[in-house]
Amino acid sequence: MEGLTPLGPGREFDRIREVLKGARIGGGGVRVPPGDDATVLDPDLVISTDLAVEGVHFRLDWLDPHEAGARAVGAAVSDLAAMGAGLLGVLASVAVPEGEVWAPRGASFMAGIRDRVEELGGRLLGGDLTRSPSGLVVDVVAVGRTHRPLLRSGGRPGDELWVTGRLGGASGAVRLWEDGRPVPAPLRLRYAHPEPRLSEAIWLVEHAHARAGLDLSDGLAGDAGHLAAASGVGVVLEASALPLEPHPEVSLEEALHGGDDFELLVALPPGAETDGRADAFRRRFGLLLTRVGSLRDGSGVALLEPGNDEPVPLTRGGWDHFRGREEEKR
Amino acid sequence: MEGLTPLGPGREFDRIREVLKGARIGGGGVRVPPGDDATVLDPDLVISTDLAVEGVHFRLDWLDPHEAGARAVGAAVSDLAAMGAGLLGVLASVAVPEGEVWAPRGASFMAGIRDRVEELGGRLLGGDLTRSPSGLVVDVVAVGRTHRPLLRSGGRPGDELWVTGRLGGASGAVRLWEDGRPVPAPLRLRYAHPEPRLSEAIWLVEHAHARAGLDLSDGLAGDAGHLAAASGVGVVLEASALPLEPHPEVSLEEALHGGDDFELLVALPPGAETDGRADAFRRRFGLLLTRVGSLRDGSGVALLEPGNDEPVPLTRGGWDHFRGREEEKR
């Protein structure tokens, strides 16, 4: 595991650590080894892979197959945004149930993948197509380039933590679906159509001097934990500052522990609100940029709630595919 | 589909053609677009992805989980050999049934992936780990480099077609398993442990002036069809010349239409037997190199059988995951 970026807590990450233990991962033209959001190969190629499985990552009573394919691409490409990289294209390995490759379900899933790649300005760089013994599966390999990778490490005590956009919408939609309740269109959209913040990340590196960052796929608490572990610092989040999706169903809990927002979390040198960096971002992208906390000496993630003097350590992690939402969150 | 290497016949390839139709696939730093065994990105990066699904590509009553993981890596890396590339490493996206990620099955599958990457001299470059609603799944993304890609196109009428090693062993093993008969160790090994011919392919490009080539994953007939289509030529295979795996269960049929041999098929300028190229290869690698046919004006693949004056067109293709072996072959 030498050279591997430390991961935050979580059973899934324990397993990844275990598998990588003793594996040769650095050297030989590998500029940033696995452990960050993507791997960087000399001179500037960024590559990441993201598996989307029907029944685990999406359900076809929530999304139609075209949306499911498109969503898998958006989520995978967000790992490039997390690295401050531009998108070159994707490879897509697809498994489709027997008899459905020409049927509307399989065809629409594949068209969703292709269409979203085009929309994002990328190319289809290859893939594989095979039969699935159960539902639809796609592994999306996102490929991009950057000369200035944005890593999870590099944050320093005193840096301020900022997030783009709003939090909790996607997992709010999932909770409503799971409870059998109607899902309002804005929440549904946040789940169905993740928007990789590609240009935003590049701008934050180039113009706001972002020192560390990643995308929010596991939930703010879990992902802040990854940044803290990789940077060797502690994180304090301010509960009252979190930019919740403006809907009565979206709670602080959702923003902290719900995944799938695919917004950016970045550590900026202090003062971005007063020195104009934050406003320049907002004008440029028409998107919120909100200070949600700061880095300090120490480790782990703590939450400062209104009325308390001291931040309280957050022990629960983010999304874990091997435990599931119910067990993890309630 | 502009710029796409033409694929040979097959329903799976029809679907891939259909999906790629109208997609933007070339330009923007893409040196060899999808359609060959792998994609080449500027300046020299080669990338390919290969999905292995339990019950479709492997069965755990045939292989243990460690072998299944290792086999998926060998098969995927063979696509780099097919391009004349060296191996940099792989990314592996793994799905494991609930409760098995720490259990022997999941752990052994992942160890098989990691161990085979190391054995082949590569690195783990990343991956994903998630829950599977059915069996084990891995998508292996093979990443390599080459300055002189070996393409499927480039073969010319008059070139001779050569294959490395022996054919039919892997699919012979599968047939015996399917018939419920004992599988002799040498055939089992050919299926369980595909050997990517990485150094051999580079040598054939550099020292034998290979003009076109690919790896044999769909069966000789199907893969020769891909080379014929991409090169815009016809292929004649000589039945009596095919280097069958020396076992009474391995027939000509198996060599032509069985997949999974992962040997190389290359088009060489004529005369390699008499000018010493073939012998130099055999000495260098201790591996068979056999002339199995030639390229001519025209299209498609034809078979010359002993006692016939004229080659007969081969209409059946190779392995198709959407039709299955039984339907396709019998």
Image: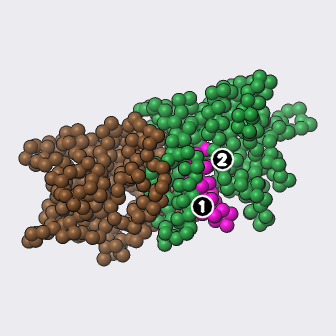
Chain colours: A green, B brown
Q: Is residue A112 left or right of residue B242?
A: right
The verdict on residue A204 being magenta is no
In space, the residues marked 1 and 2 are separated at their CA atoms by 16 Å
Seen at 74% across and 63% down, the residue is: A178
Label 1 secondary element = helix
Q: Mark 1 belongs to which amino acid?
A: His
Say which element carries label 2.
loop
**With respect to residue A99, does A186 lie above or below?**
above
- In this view of the protein, which residue sits in the foreground, B259 or B300? B300
Residue A81, horizontal then vertical, whole percent: 61, 39
Tell me if residue A56 is in the magenta stretch: yes
| Nearer to us in this view, B76 or A320 | B76
In which quadrant of the rendered image does the C terminus of chain B lie? bottom left
**Stretch in magenta:** A51-78
Residue labelled with disc 2: A195
Whole-percent x, y for residue B32 in the image = 38, 45
What's the residue at 83%, 55% (across, down)? A249
Amino acid beneath label 2: Glu
In-image side of A209 versus A236 (left or right): left
- Toward the right, the furthest residue is A307
Report the chain holding disc 2.
A
